[in-house]
Image (cartoon, rainbow, N blue to C red):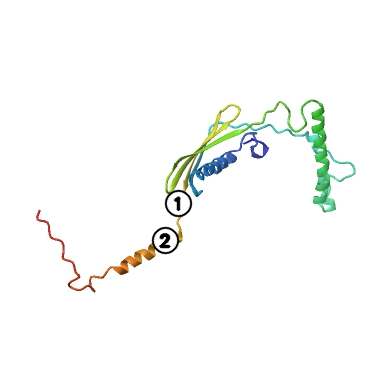
Amino acid sequence: MPVRERVQNRYGTLHGGCTATLVDTLTTAALLTVSPLPGVSMVLSVNYVAPMPGTPVPHPPASAAEAPVAGRPHASAAGAGGDAAQCAAAAAPTAMAARQQNRQEQGRDGSGDGSEPEDVEEEVVVIDARVVKAGRQVATLAAELRRKRTGQLVATGSHTKFVQVLDPAMGRLKQLASSATGMDKPRAADAGPQQQLAPPPRSRL
C-alpha cells in the first residue's frame, strides 16, 4: 500500500491507527479464505517495531497560497457582509490557481511536473496476513508489515476472532428434542408392577 499523505501522521510516517486497521482488515480477509464467517474480534494486538516513512508531500509556498485577490474581499473580512461561505468560495479558485502556477514553475525549473519531484520514490508498505490456526469457535491470525524498499520489519500484529455463530433456530430445535424425549419416558408413579425394573444386584466385594 502506498504511504501517502492521507495515511501519514504529523511526523510524515505511517499512522499507528492505520497500521492497526490494516492488521484488523487483512487478517479478517485471510480468515475468509478458510472460513465462510468473518467472526468478531476478541483480541487485537499490534507491536510497532520501526517507523514506516511516508512519501514526501510537496506543499506550495505559504505566500502564494495566502495571497489576497485584487478586487475580491479577503476571507477574514466576510463577517462584515454576513456571508462567509460566498467569500471563501470566491477565494478558493484563486488559491488553487496559485498552487497550479507554482507547480508549473517547478516543472520549468526541471523538478518535474509540479506534483512530485522526480528523485522522490514513493514509499510502499507490504502487509503479509496469514491464518495461524482456525478452530470451530476461535481463529488465531497474524500479520507482518514491512517496508518494500528495504524489507525492514515495521510492525507485527496478532488477531484472535470468535467465529461460531449461535443460531436461534437450532436452540429451539434442541429444546423441542429434549421435551419430546422427556415425554416419551414413563414416570415411576404411573408404571405398573410389571414395568418396574428390579434394582441392580449388590456387589459381593
Q: Is 103 situated left or right of 168 in this image?
A: right
Give the residue number, with chain letter if any, for mark 2.
171
Look at label 1 and name its amino acid. Gln
Question: In this orientation, which residue lies closer to the viewer: 173 or 124?
Answer: 173
Name the secondary structure under disc 2: helix
Instruction: Count residues near mark 2 (Cα–Cα under 10 Å), then give few for <14, some for 14-19, many for 20+.
Output: few
| Screen quadrant of the N terminus | top right
Question: In this orientation, which residue lies closer to the viewer: 53 or 34?
Answer: 34
Question: Measured from the top left, where is residue 110 in percent x and y?
Answer: 79, 25
Give the residue number, with chain letter if any, for mark 1.
164
Instruction: Count residues near mark 1 (Cα–Cα under 10 Å), then give few for <14, some for 14-19, many for 20+.
Output: some
Query: In the image, is residue 194 above or below residue 7?
Result: below
Look at label 2 and name its amino acid. Gly
Residue plotted at (58% across, 34% down): 126
Of marks 1 and 2, which one's residue comes earlier in the chain? 1
Give residue 132's quadrant in the image: top left
Residue plotted at (28% across, 68% down): 185
